[in-house]
Amino acid sequence: AALLERAVALLRIDKNRALDLFTTGDGGLINKDLYVFCFAPDGTITAHPSFIGFDIYSSENKDIHGTQLGESLFKAAPSGGTGEVTYELPRYTTGSEQEFTKTTLVTRVAGQVCGVGYYHPQ
């Protein structure tokens, strides 16, 4: 939650700089599996360590239960508050296809949907 609060503060100060920082991880904004991501309401990913420009609403972006992640994140993200979505997908840093449970905290700020997700201990 602290990383998401920091992200919101940065977005309110300078949106374009903040999106760049989230992507590069400068200033400690990427810590192992913890990172900030954002997407525009049209689904274009605007900040992420690996997936800039991808469509978060694409049909391939589902968890093992068939939940469309972009739609779930968009629906859960309140303006001025924090929502939560839990799903299962591979942990990108492992290079494995093994599925892990992940919870993402999401909010809407500066015309973006932004979130920080964490993996549950196995």
Image: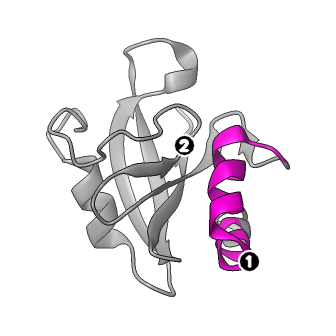
Label 2: element kind: loop
Q: Quadrant of residue 97?
A: top left
Give residue 11's position: percent from left, percent from top. 65, 71
Q: Quadrant of residue 49?
A: top right
In this rendering, the label closer to the viewer, 2 or 1: 1
Q: Quadrant of residue 78?
A: bottom left
Q: Amino acid at mark 1?
A: Ile
Label 1: which residue? Answer: 13
Residue at far bottom of view: 80
Residue at 71%, 59% (x, y): give it: 17
| Magenta-drawn stretch contains 13 | yes
Residue at far front of view: 16
> Which is more toward the observer, 68 or 49?
49
Residue at 52%, 77% (x, y): give it: 109
From mark 2 to mark 1, how far is it between C-alphas? 19 Å
Q: Quadrant of the N terminus?
A: bottom right
Residue at 67%, 65% (x, y): give it: 7
Residue at far right of view: 27
Q: Amino acid at mark 2?
A: His
| Mark found first going from the N terminus, 2 or 1 | 1
Give residue 83's position: percent from left, percent from top. 42, 73
Label 1: element kind: helix
| Above-or-below relation of 1 to 47 | below
Task: State whether the magenta stretch is mostly helix, strand or loop.
Answer: helix
Residue at 69%, 60% (x, y): give it: 18
| Magenta-drawn stretch contains 107 | no
* Mark 1, other Cα within 10 Å: few <14 / some 14–19 / many ≥20: few
Query: Which region is colored magenta?
Result: 7-26
Q: Which mark is residue 48?
A: 2
Give residue 53's position: percent from left, percent from top. 41, 41
- Pointers 2 and 1 in contact (CB under 8 A)? no
